[in-house]
Amino acid sequence: MDNLLLTVLLSAIVTLSGCSNETSLPEKPVATDGIKSVKISGDASLILLTTKDDQQQQAVMTAKPSGWLSGWFYNDCKANGDMIVSGQTLLIKARNSGWYDLSECSTYLRINLPRNVDVTIDQPAFKGDFQGQFAGLNIETRAADIALQGSASSVRIRGDAFRTKLHFDGTAQPEQIDIAGRALDTSLIFPTGTSVSYLIHSKASLLDTKLPNTQGAKPEILISGDYARTEIR
């Protein structure tokens, strides 16, 4: 049952991942210098967030053909979303083309940020790749494929079915990792010698871990779901 639910709800992620290499010209980049928080909403999208010091700090939105007829018919794919800066917050709203288009367009976001920015994502489905050092990750979704290589001070994820692989590099130790949904596939990887505490609430659960459950240790890991597969290393 858990595998079926993951397969059905993550089908949107597979569609996004299989987008054509053809992209529209990028919208005008938005500078992210001085940004303290990012809020991403709207339609499903592909999201790449980095905190690379050797690259320009900016946000770029493009669009890729993703409809099942996209390889048969030409369609001018354009990014229709909005990106604005309000104070020290970058606000992004993705807008994909409608179901009636022969070749639908999916939004692709490439954002390089200062370190330790708060990230909030509220989308029905997305594929997210986070590389670098972040503050809080706060995610609301139905289906998602989420990967982190770096650090985050806290993680909170809510949704129906999603796959999560968080690989912490030890730059900053998270205080709490709180993941809840219906069907979960969660992988948490920590530096050698990390002590963790964890609590898992699930109707059906598979836990694979080599780390002892140390009472009071940080990070505190909370996993809640009807069906949960959890790896802690």
Image (cartoon, rainbow, N blue to C red):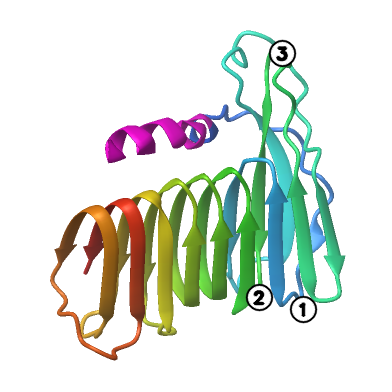
Asked if residue 138 lies left or right of residue 43, the reply is: left
- Separation of disc 1 and disc 3 at Cα? 40 Å
Main SS class of the magenta portion in the image: helix
Q: Name the N-terminal-most of marks 1 and 2.
A: 1
- Separation of disc 2 and disc 3 at Cα? 38 Å
Q: Quadrant of residue 126?
A: top right
Q: Which residues are magenta?
A: 1-15
Q: Name the N-terminal-most of marks 2 and 3.
A: 3
Identify whether 192 is placed above or below 132. below
Identify whether 9 is placed above or below 180. above
Nearest the eye: 75 or 85? 85
Which quadrant, please, contains the N terminus?
top left
Name the residue that disc number 3 marks: 74
Q: Amino acid at mark 3?
A: Tyr
Residue 114 - label: 2
Which quadrant, please, contains the C terminus?
bottom left
Q: Amino acid at mark 1?
A: Gly
Residue 34 - label: 1
Residue 30, given in percent of the width and then of the height, sits at: 81, 59
Residue 12, given in percent of the width and then of the height, sits at: 51, 33
Nearest the eye: 72 or 194? 194
Contact check, label 2 and label 3, Cβ < 8 Å: no
Looking at the image, which residue is at 76% across and 50% down?
Answer: 93
Q: Residue furthest top?
A: 72
Q: Amino acid at mark 2?
A: Pro
Within 10 Å of disc 2 (Cα), the crowding (few <14, some 14-19, many 20+) is many
Looking at the image, which residue is at 32% across and 57% down?
Answer: 186
Nearest the eye: 170 or 13? 13
Contact check, label 1 and label 2, Cβ < 8 Å: yes
